[in-house]
Amino acid sequence: MQFNRNLINLYNQLSPKSPEIFSSFMVSNPVFIVSTPRSGSTLLFEQMIQLDNVWSIGGESHVIFREFPHLRFENLQYDSACLSKNHADPQTSLLFKLATFSMLRNNCNQPLVNLDLSHHKQDLFLEKTPRNALNIPFLLEIFPNAKFIYLYREPKQNVASIIEAWKIGEKTGQFVTFSNLQGWDRKNWCFLLPKGWRKMNGKSLAEIAYFQWKESNQQIMQNLESLPKNRWTALDYADFIKNPYSEISNLIKIFSIGATANQSDYQQLALSKTTSTTPAKDKWKRHQEQISPLISDMQEQYQNIKNFVDSKCRHPNGK
């Protein structure tokens, strides 16, 4: 694959110069935002990559994943898109890190690969792709010291947004991740593909959206629970929207980012680039008839998330 050959050439160029710096930057300083689709992760990501000393590839890592066909599905039976540590064989791990490294840009759009790496050993690189809710074991195998921001959102709002995105996907192809998926009764599948997706055949969009919300949150919690508290934190989307300056400042403190948030930049957040319709508190009611039968279970699951965060998460005060 030409992509891989280019990466190997890049590695050969970098290794003699500064192998320890490359290793340090790519192994010690990754932070991944993990969340359900449509939970506000793009907005959070867009705010954080404006900070000094934060590097990113500029968007989601689909562009990288597409270069590794064996990472498209869990197995040849298409049972899910969940990736385990076994998917991160040594060659995949090296090439995945190189692909990420080769695309990193700062908030001035300067490529890291063209700069003196010795000045950036303590910087941080930030990544967010919704499918990573299912990929935490894979990410930990490639980036053993990875840290995580668990962004979660109230289910009625989140599920309604997923429903709307599915409708857009069926009309335009936006948000579609799998076309003509074997064993699926619709033309397209949107967003991440959890285990058990086939049981959604014949279900309403509300049931499909809630399935994605519930399964991705459960996968995130299951995989974060075993990590030390200093390896992850959590953020409620509602808190972020209510006081973005305070929440960004907390994240700067938690991850020791050498940057300062300017309060004036957070007086009014711009819409994220993936916003499909104007945000509104009661927007979920457009889908109330479909969502109402699910609300009881939604609220139970949401309370489970809040209990998990309260008991397991490292908070800004370090406790």
Image (spheres, rainbow, N blue to C red):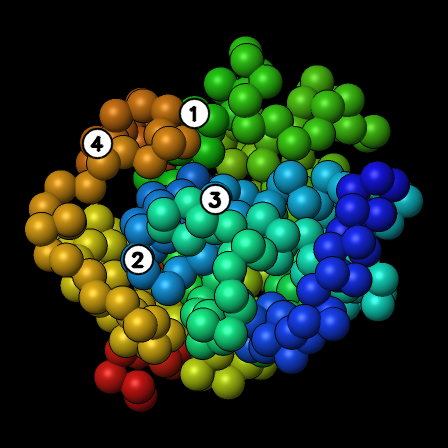
Q: Earlier in the sequence, mark 4 or mark 1?
A: 1
| Image position of 198 with respect to 195: above or below | above
Please name whichever residue, 95 or 309, is drawn nearer the observer in this view of the structure.
95
Q: Which residue is mark 4?
A: 280
Q: Earlier in the sequence, mark 3 or mark 2?
A: 2
Using a 10 Å C-alpha cutoff, classify the residue at mark 1 as few (fewer than 14 neighbours), some (14 to 19) or many (20 or more).
some
Q: Is residue 59 left or right of residue 287?
A: right
Q: Which residue is mark 2?
A: 51
Q: Is residue 219 left or right of residue 281?
A: right
Give the amino acid at mark 4.
Ala
Residue 54: percent from left, percent from top: 40, 60
| Image position of 9 with respect to 117: above or below | above
Separation (CA) of disc 3 from disc 1 = 25 Å
Q: Which residue is mark 1?
A: 164
Q: Earlier in the sequence, mark 3 or mark 1?
A: 3
Residue 134: percent from left, percent from top: 63, 55
Give the amino acid at mark 1.
Glu
Q: In the structure shown, which secondary structural element does the residue marked by tag 2 occupy?
A: loop
Task: Name the residue rendered at 21%, 31% in the picture.
Answer: 280
- Looking at the image, do the residues carrying marks 4 and 3 touch, with CB atoms under 8 Å apart? no
Separation (CA) of disc 4 from disc 3 = 27 Å
Please name whichever residue, 298 or 249, is drawn nearer the observer in this view of the structure.
249
Q: Quadrant of the N terminus?
A: top right
Q: Quadrant of the C terminus?
A: bottom left
Q: Which residue is mark 3?
A: 58
